[in-house]
Image (tube, rainbow, N blue to C red):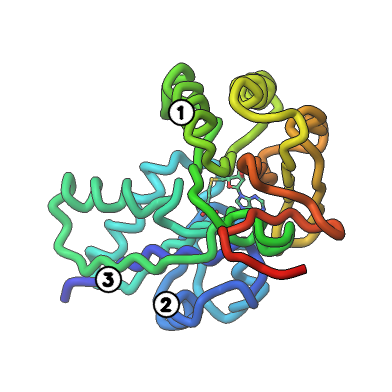
Amino acid sequence: MAGKLTVVGFGPGSKGDMTLRAVEAIENADVVTGYTTYVNLMKEYFPDKKYKATGMMKEIERCRMAIEDASTGLSVAMISSGDSGIYGMAGIIYQLVDEMNADIELDVIPGVTAASAAASILGAPLMHDLAIISLSDLLTPYDLIMKRIDSAGAGDLIVCLYNPRSKTRREHLPEAVETLLKHRSPETPVGIVKNAGREGEVAIISTLGNMPYDEVDMFSIVIVGNSQTYVSDGKMITPRGYEVKK
Ligand code: SAH
C-alpha cells in the first residue's frame, strides 16, 4: 500500500500558533521527521510520537529519507517551521517525488509564517503590499537579492527580510538597508522580531537610518515599513487607506 507524506508547517514555534490541520497531521503520523531542533520542539507537544531527527544531515538527504519511508507504506509527517511552502521543504519534496518516481500520497499543510507572527507582535505593519526577500545567498545569487531589494524599495513595498544575518554573513543587511535608503527616508520604521512565538522572544522597533544590526541574527526577521508606516504607542502600523476620524 502506498504511504503518505505530509509536509507540515508548524508555525513560529508555540503550540497555540499551530493550525488544527498541522496538529492532526502530526497526531496521525507513524513517524515525524525533521531537523533535530524542530523535532525536539514537537516532542514537547507530542511526547508519544515516534520521531526521526536528522541532525545536520543535508536537506535533500532528509527529504529523500522521508519519501523512502513513505514509499514503504508509512504515514510520514515532515515538519518545518513557519509555512513549509515559504523557504521550507514543500518545493524540494515535490521535485524529489518527481525525480524518484515515488508512488506516495503527498499533502502540504500551511503554517503561520515568520512574517505574520512577527507582524502581530509589532502591531500591524503588513497592511499593504509587501515583498518577502531572503538575504541568504546560499541558493540565490547575491546580485539578484540586491536587485530585488532595490525593486521592492522603488515600488514602495513593505519589505520582510528572512535569513537577515548570520555569523558569517554580516554585510548583506547593511547593503540591503543602504539600497532601501536610496528610496526611503531614514525615519522609516523598522521592526525586528527575534524568536517570534518562541522562548526568548524579543521585539524592537527602530528606524531604517538607525538599524540596530547587533540585535539581528538568524532567528530574527526584519520588517521595513513603506513610506506611510508609522509608530504609535510602541506599535508599528502601516495604514491600509481607510479614512478614520480622530
Ligand atoms: N518556513 C519559515 C522560514 C524559514 S527561513 C517560515 O515560513 O517562517 C528561516 C528564517 O525565517 C530565519 O532566518 C528567520 O529570518 C525567519 N524565522 C523563522 N522562524 C522565526 C521566528 N520564530 N521568529 C523570527 N524569525 C523567524
Question: x, y percentage for residue 114?
Answer: 59, 55
Q: Which residue is mark 2?
A: 25
What residue is shown at x 81% (from left), y 37% (from top)? 215
Dot 3 or dot 1, earlier in sequence: 3
Dot 3 or dot 2, earlier in sequence: 3
Compared to residue 58, the image places residue 3 above or below, namely below
What residue is shown at x 69% (from left), y 45% (from top)? 220
Is 136 left, or right, of 218 in this rendering? left
Compare residues 100 and 148 and report the one nearer the observer: 148
Is 17 left, or right, of 209 in this rendering? left
What residue is shown at x 78% (from left), y 36% (from top)? 207
Instruction: Name the amino acid, label 1.
Output: Ser
Label 3 with label 2: CB-CB less than 8 Å: no
Query: For residue 4, which numbered disc appears in the image?
Result: 3
> In the picture, which quadrant includes the N terminus?
bottom left
Label 1 Cα neighbours within 10 Å, binned few <14 / some 14-19 / many ≥20: some
Residue lying at the far right of the rendered structure: 233
